[in-house]
Amino acid sequence: MNVATESRAAPGSVAVGADCDPRPEPDSPDGWSFADRPALEAMAARARGTPFFAYDRSAVDRRIAKLRSALPDDVGLLYSVKANPFYPLVHHISRGVDGFDVSSAAELTLALDTGMKASGITFAGPGKSNDELRLAIAVGATVSIESAGELDRIDRIAGDLGRTPQVMLRVNPDLDLPGVGMRMGGEARQFGVDIEQCPALLRRLAAFGDAFRGYHVYWGSQCLDADVVAAAQAQTIDALVSLASIAGHSPALFNIGGGFGIPYSSRAQPLDLTAVGAALEMRMAALRREFPALRVVVELGRYLVGEAGIYVCKVLERKTSRGQVFLVTDGGLHHHLSASGNLGQLIKRNYPMFVGGRAGADADERVHVAGRLCTPIDLLARDISLPRAEVDDLVVITQSGAYGPSSSPAGFLSHPAAAELLV
Ligand SMILES: *Cc1c(COP(=O)(O)O)cnc(C)c1O
């Protein structure tokens, strides 16, 4: 298997700051297992051509099993549907996790379609409409309250429906976490209620009794450092314990967020899940004594599905511009914005990729892999080493199972959507 190497000084890259940093292992036990040319041709036939995304269900199963064995037995696992809302995949995942974290009415109904019980579904997001709140309350999903105003609306809608809403409080904590790629707490944010403002809301939530189920913190994303994850989880639990003592109500649920990252480059080490599990187990021992009925859950998107997916496109043209080779493909950022480095990445790093059927060939050519859109930012790789690829060769981008089609500007240039397959 030829895994492409990446360059530090790629054209168009913006070298600002640092974030947790990734790597490819298409042939790892957790990763893609059948990316040879006949298998790719069979998938392309099923997809009616290129480009397409394919998700490996057995890789997802292995990832869930790995989480179950590394994390304490009584820690629940939620899948964050927004990472990949492809229905067959979400349906498959529904059998292996304890619940879903959803962020819109459409994700909520999709989650219900899989057979997931409403009691396993939590609905977070700073801009829930009245219709969305009505839906969540009517079906009995748990709403993560993100502001005092939202609690007013929940009260009103629940009154109209004559239902007791299941709610939890999403807290914007003040955690001290050096080195988290994307920080989601401790600052002014549209997400959650600042921890300083929580006591006032807790007085109102007392009226909900057991329908006030607990607390939710989402502290970050894409972190590969087990020490940082462990610190975030411990600080989150500490903050929630202190809120629960103010509330004087024994919570049923602590959703302590996710943040588990996957490696996108050969220089990055995968997250040490065993270390994360061991640290959490240590913190949980005291927590179980304090709140025997409490359920702790983590919510993961990328970590569950990111390494299980590939994106496959075809070389339409090979061209040389001022001495540099461009492979122009039928893919692009309209399908896979994150691979082009334009989905909020601070540094544009190439995703791991290889040329279909060229396992074992030397990566002896430095090229740019372009998409087909009329914008210079549509580069799927900048200055990457690949085996020489010709027109009609397939380019396979791994680590593509999360934040693909649903996070990409599908309408730009009006090309068709990429097919998606669960294999
Ligand atoms: C997006 C999101 C997640 C999933 O994040 P990943 O980095 O994909 O694991 C989890 N929780 C909330 C509240 C989110 O918005």
Image: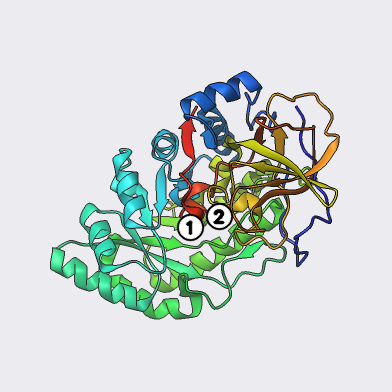
Q: Hey, which residue is sitting farthest top in the picture? A: 38
Vertical placement of residue 240 versus 304, above or below? below
Q: Residue at x 40, y 47 (%)?
A: 100
- From the top left corner, tell me how far across and down residue 196 is, in percent: 49, 80
Q: Residue at x 44, y 39 (%)?
A: 97
Q: Is residue 328 left or right of residue 331?
A: right
Q: Amino acid at mark 1?
A: Glu
Q: In which quadrant is the N terminus drawn?
A: top right
Q: How many marks?
A: 2
CB of mark 2 within 8 Å of CB of mark 1? Answer: yes
- From the top left corner, tell me how far across and down residue 405 is, in percent: 50, 47
- From the top left corner, tell me how far across and down residue 343 is, in percent: 59, 58
Task: Check disc 1 and report the residue beneath it.
Answer: 290
- From the top left corner, tell me how far across and down residue 237 is, in percent: 54, 61
Comparing 330 with 33, the one in front is 330
Dot 2: element:
helix
**In the image, which disc is placed on residue 286?**
2
**In the image, which disc is placed on residue 229?**
none
Residue count near mark 2 (Cα–Cα under 10 Å), binned few <14, some 14–19, many ≥20: few
Q: Is residue 361 left or right of residue 90?
A: right
Q: Residue at x 67, y 58 (%)?
A: 376
Dot 1: element:
helix
Report which quarter residue 95 is drawn in: top left
